């Protein structure tokens, strides 16, 4: 109806080019039910201590693009305590080490001949190209998963660093570039996380990936992303561990009358995840 109304007005409106639909998100093996208080709804998020970027990440990682999916507290906890904490640890470790070297991005003129850096650059470049294709097709789940694979490459690269001062400049500048790139890739999914990373990098937010400006090609040369002698901000942790007792408390808080297994109306059989993803 809305596109028809736009056309009928005769004005030059920007028209929708793609419609993205999903299946249903269910809750703990059952169904969301507003009337019975079963499940977590947008207003309920404020009653938890879980940051909004955790909700955004988990809901989009579980986005039911081809079949129904289920929200599970233990699954949310596992995603936070492994993937998101791993993401935060990568960013924090890189920036803390740079802080230990005077908080300045070093120059690394030999990076392009450093085999470990060039190898990770090739892999990351391919992943970023895959990410762009997924996002253009509104395959958000695949785009998010691909962005997290870039994080995985950052972890693998960082593990190769042995504290060799002769190669410290190459590793630090390349890893800092990967941190910057990851913040840009994850911005559509966790904007507050990305802004926090840019604040710690002491840079204005930059979220575009323009092929015309060579930014896609630059992804394969992460040591060129940040300029040498740039001074970063103050590193700080980005995520906190979610304890078992908190998860059990939330399960009880939002369980409603699920245990009685009362019949529910057909319209409560599921929840459109895109409504929750816009928290």
Image: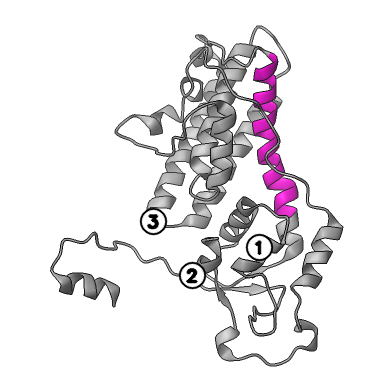
Front of the two marks 1 and 3: 1
Q: Earlier in the sequence, mark 2 or mark 1?
A: 2
**Is residue 3 found left or right of 248 in the rendered image?**
left
Q: Of residues 94 and 6, which is closer to you in this image?
A: 6
Per the model, the C-alpha gap separating discs 3 and 2 is: 14 Å
- Mark 2, secondary structure of its residue: loop
Q: Which residue is drawn at 47% across and 17% down?
A: 227
The range drawn in magenta is: 78-100
98 inside magenta stretch: yes
**Residue bearing the label numbered 1:** 45
Where residue 197 appears, as percent x and y from the top left, is 58, 35
Compared to residue 87, the image places residue 274 above or below, namely below
Viewer can see residue 24? yes
Circle 1 Cα neighbour tier, 10 Å, few/some/many (<14 / 14–19 / ≥20)? some
Q: Name the residue under label 3.
A: 137
The spot of residue 34 in percent (x, y) is 63, 80
Residue ranking furthest to the left: 10
Q: In the rendering, which numbered label is found on residue 69?
A: none
**Disc 1 from disc 3: Cα separation:** 30 Å
Disc 2 designates what residue? 22
Q: What element carries label 3?
A: loop
Image position of 112 with respect to 200: above or below: above
What type of secondary structure mainly makes up the magenta span? helix
Question: For the residue labelled by badge 1, is the local secondary structure a helix, a strand or a loop?
Answer: helix
Question: Badge 3, how many Cα within 10 Å: few under 14, some, many 20+?
Answer: few
The part of the image, by quadrant, that contains residue 253 is: bottom right
């Amino acid at each position: 109806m809305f596109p028809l109304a736009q056309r009928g007005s005769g004005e030059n409106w920007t028209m929708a080019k793609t419609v993205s639909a999903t299946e249903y998100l269910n809750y703990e093996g059952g169904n969301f039910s507003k009337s019975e208080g079963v499940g977590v709804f947008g207003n309920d998020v404020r009653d938890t201590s879980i940051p909004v970027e955790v909700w955004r990440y988990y809901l989009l990682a579980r986005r039911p693009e081809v079949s129904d999916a289920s929200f599970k507290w233990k699954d949310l906890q596992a995603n936070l305590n492994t993937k998101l904490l791993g993401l935060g640890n990568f960013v924090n470790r890189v920036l803390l080490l740079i802080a230990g070297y005077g908080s300045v991005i070093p120059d690394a003129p030999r990076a392009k001949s450093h085999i470990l850096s060039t190898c990770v650059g090739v892999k990351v470049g391919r992943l970023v190209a895959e990410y762009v294709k997924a996002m253009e097709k509104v395959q958000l789940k695949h785009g998010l998963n691909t962005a997290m694979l870039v994080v995985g490459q950052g972890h693998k690269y960082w593990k190769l660093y042995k504290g060799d001062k002769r190669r410290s400049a190459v590793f630090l500048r390349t890893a800092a570039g990967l941190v910057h790139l990851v913040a840009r890739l994850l911005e559509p999914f966790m904007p507050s996380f990305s802004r926090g990373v840019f604040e710690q990098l002491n840079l204005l937010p930059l979220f575009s990936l323009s092929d015309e400006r060579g930014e896609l090609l630059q992804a394969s040369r992460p040591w060129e992303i940040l300029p040498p002698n740039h001074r970063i901000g103050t590193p700080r942790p980005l995520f906190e561990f979610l304890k078992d007792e908190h998860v059990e408390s939330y399960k009880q808080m939002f369980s409603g009358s699920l245990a009685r297994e009362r019949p529910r109306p057909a319209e409560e059989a599921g929840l459109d995840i895109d409504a929750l993803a816009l928290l």
